Amino acid sequence: MKKIININFHGRVVPIEETAFDILNQYVESLRKYFANEEGRDEIINDIENRFAELFAERLKAGANCITDADVNNIIASMGRPEDFEAADADGGVPPKTEQQSSSQQQSQQSYTYATSPSRGRLYRNADDKILGGVCSGLANYLSIDPVILRIAFVILFGALFWVYLLLWIVVPSQSQQSSITKRLFRSADDKVIGGVAGGLAAYFNIQVWIPRLIFALPFVVGIASGIFHAAFWDWDFAPRFISGGLGSTLIISYIILWIAVPVANTASEKLEMRGERVDLNSIANTIKGDLEGFKGRAEKMGNDIKEGAQKFGAEFKSTAQQKSRDLSYEISNRRSSGLGHVIGVLFKAFFLFIASVIALSLFGVLIGLLFGGMALLPFKNFFLSGVGENFLAWLSLILFLGVPLIAILTWLIRRIMGARSKNHYLGYVFGTLWVIGLVSLIILFTDFVRNFRAKDFVEESVNISQPVIGKLYVDETNARRGFHYFSHRWNWVDWDNDWPIYGDNYDSLLLNTVRVDVVKSKDSFFHVQKLKFSRGRTQKQAQETAEKIDFGIMQQDSVLLLPRGGFPISKNEKFRNQQVLVIIEVPVGKKIQIDGSVHNYNWFNINVRRNGWTISDDDEWNNDWNERYDWEANTEYIMTAKGLERTDKTYENNEEENEHKKVTPKSDKGYRYKGIDSNKTKEAAPKKDSATQQKSVKEAQPQEKTASLKKSEEDVGSEKASSPVYFLSMILQ
Amino acid sequence: MRKGILEFCIFSIIRRGEAYPSDIVEEMKGANLHILEGTLYPLLTRLKNSEMLTYRWVESNSGPPRKYFSLTPKGEQFYKELEATWNELASAVHALASKKENMPDSTNQNPSF
């Protein structure tokens, strides 16, 4: 069953089989090439076509429904193929009308020294099918193989073969050749996702399109999968790395090579060639190829024989020029991708595609990381969330906000590989809506959660201690483990060293280390220890209740004050509400104190919720209860003097510097104040404010004793604090 | 075919009366001289461009219009030259082919008495 088309052939409508039409076209093309140099070329071809039309009319009149392949071939046989034409050289007395170009005689004679080819097996560069110079194509015709194979070889071995290519390009003459291969590898122009490589391969091998596409996409998929598993399970690799890595890069590179080297099937005949469906055209193509070579030979002979040599050479030169320009216009009109521009274009496209895919992949990875991070924090969930509502919202937002984009990306990827196109984009809308719901629930959850920290309250306890006999108090932490699992090493992939306030857990409680030890001057000549327990909550009352429940037992052993190691536990009932414990040690003048380095395991941070926002900070913006706490360094012995806490070993020469390091002044006066210690201060907020600022200005006037800026003091509040991420956050948020 | 002979044949046919290419091919076939139409068309066109032939279009009912060729005066003149050439060639060949005697040879002189 063959397709029939109607053509307008010299003013007549002729029904003709499509295959016959192609044969006819090929024949006319061959004539065109044969008569390229003839001045009357168009007329000749017109005459021949006229003859065809006449014979077609006879056939149709004789009762045929349409013109078939056989008809066309018969007519061609009687008409003769270009190779059979003798008229070109049987033409002694009638030279074709040409222009006299004696100056070009030398040049054209030179150009014809190349064309001394009698045999068919001569190597030429193919002028019709060239990406750069037609070297590969010509070579392939010579060797009767698909030029793509050679192109790929040249691209792969670019370094070595580059000079070979250049040499061939210069030395080997160019000629218009029809390729002799029927089935050639093309890139598909219709069925392309990126460059049509997979489509072309599928057509060549007669397989489904998604198979090569999947093969090319496989390393990505494997890479993603192995990345996920690698991150989640740390030691379990999905596949040996060299398979996913090496194979992936090979496939990518081969895709790019094919993209460059393989031409796009634009014309119908190319597309048919891509599928390798025409056998009858092959013989014609072969013959025509031979024709043209023979024509060149005869033309050269003719040039040698005839005494009007000058005319002949001029004619040939003009003919080659004409042919070249005609070929170029033919190529341009066919939108053939030739030249270096194509290679550069492909490389650019590949590069941008690579960048885009890297970005997409990293987004994907981030999503997965967040998802798994969310999963990993699961044990802590109950410490943060309370109630059914919050839990539900949390799950909802996790699934929708993170899970939906993940699924969407995977789906899109798979669909692209399969080449499936959806008629309507309902899937996109569904995913988008779900994601927005997830986002909304996340926001709701977040605002609700933050409200838990709105109010703050504290409970104060006084710790009974006996005065140390030696006049020096030593502060250390206990060794008791208290059944906790301490996160001192990396936990999954997070390296939770001592920087994090969450120090350990068992299944029922979470160990917080938001503890701080402050040293102040005692009013009397005794040591005092106060314990302040802070907590946040939805309401003041809730905060107070939660604060009350903090269990932080301070013990004393001789002259050593023992603080619970790690911190204090909170249970699932109380939830995490930024509970804090402040240990205030009042040191009388003349007595010494030394704090052990283990106390630095405590990490202090504040979560402050205000009407217009919330911050996490390291300072005492809200907690400025006492006005003068002294800074201290661990493992250093200090003595309390009238001026303040001083080191007992006076290695610091500069008193100023030493003193500057000491005091921490409150930054602002907002919030409530601890009413206990300083009797110099009034107990109300407003006056306190004035006095504080007064005090501050007074202090600033005496740079020796007072700190210059909060920032400086911040720097010295414990050497470890600088490395804490919370500290950074607070600096930024200030 | 040797240069010029084909033109000579074509001219001979056209000289007798205007003809179109298909006819010419038929006549030559009748004279046992087979050429291809594809050979003829370019030749005719060249001759026309050299002003040795001229043509006119003749409409036809069954098929496209046809070109009918006829000789120009210049063509007539050229024909005469070709004819002369051909006659020379023919007689030369004939003379060589029909010689009964041997070639004059120094070692083999056989004068017939």
Image (spheres, coloured by chain):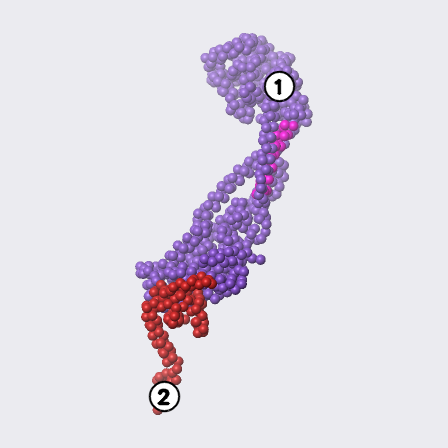
Label annotation for residue B110: 2
> Which amino acid does the dot numbered 1 rest on?
Arg
The x, y position of residue A187, in whole percent, is 52, 50
Give the extent of the magenta segment: A392-417
Depth check: B9 or A462 in front?
A: B9
- Chain A is which colour? purple
Residue depicted at 52% across the width and 45% down the height:
A194
Residue reaching furthest to the bottom: B113
The answer to if A393 sits in the magenta stretch is yes
Chain hosting mark 1: A
The x, y position of residue B32, in whole percent, is 45, 74
Instruction: State whether residue A515 appears in this view.
Output: no
Q: Secondary structure at mark 1?
A: loop
Magenta: main secondary structure equals helix
Q: Quadrant of residue B51?
A: bottom left
Label annotation for residue A538: 1
